[in-house]
Image (spheres, grey):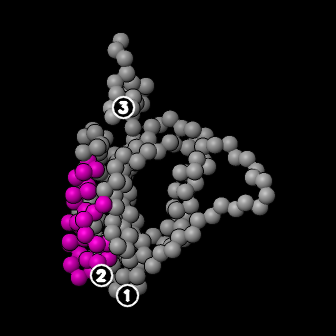
Amino acid sequence: MEGPSFCSGLPDPSCFGYAFQYGMVFDAGSSHTSLFVYQWTSDKTNDTGVVSQTLSCNVQGPGISSYANDPPKAGVSLRSCLEDALKVIPDERQREVPVYLGATAGMRLLSMENKSAADQVLNEVAKTIQQYPVNFHGARIITGEEEGAYGWITINYLLDSFTKVWLMRDGNTICAIIILDS
């Protein structure tokens, strides 16, 4: 039996009887859009999957709300990052990869000013993503509350709050996040 194989210095998970699962998230902010590819194994710590970011790609151009007067360009703007993302995901896993696009403040404002234009932009980005071999779960405008909750989850994940044993802190120390967005 051969020893474990390595990719980028990390053991290949198939050596241990499991493979990576992947997910893609587009963060469509007011000034720009980013695509993040995450990977994790079926192995859990405290019933929480240990997730690592495999790719971060900044979409060229402004945020998708800037394409209100030419919605097809919003979809076209995502292509380069989608192609980069598929390069880091094995071909045989791509069709099962869940993909989400969450639009934030810029699209919330556009939706209040011109709901039809906002809907057209979301339809165009959805049409583009659906042309790729992925499991697209939708493009939508998330609420400010959802954005805050995702921020809270992110900061607590980065602080290992979900994988460490919780201990009562001394004194009146409170941890919080403040999101200042347009």
Chain part drawn in magenta: 58-86
Res 9 label:
3
Q: Nearer the viewer, residue 147 or 179?
A: 179
Q: Is residue 167 visible?
A: yes
The residue identified by callout 2 is 117
Real-space Cα separation, disc 2 to disc 3, in angstroms: 46 Å
- Circle 2 residues within 10 Å: few <14, some 14–19, many ≥20: some
Residue found 36% across the figure and 31% down from its top: 9
Q: Tag 3: residue type?
A: Gly
Residue 157 at what x, y percent from top left?
Answer: 55, 51
Magenta residues: mostly which secondary structure?
A: helix
Residue found 26% across the figure and 77% down from its top: 67
Q: Nearer the viewer, mark 1 or mark 3?
A: 3
Instruction: First in sequence, mark 1 or 3: give its number.
Output: 3
Image vertical order of residue 15 relative to residue 107, above or below:
above
Could you tell me which quadrant the C terminus lies in? bottom left
Q: Tag 2: residue type?
A: Ala
Residue 7 at what x, y percent from top left?
Answer: 33, 32
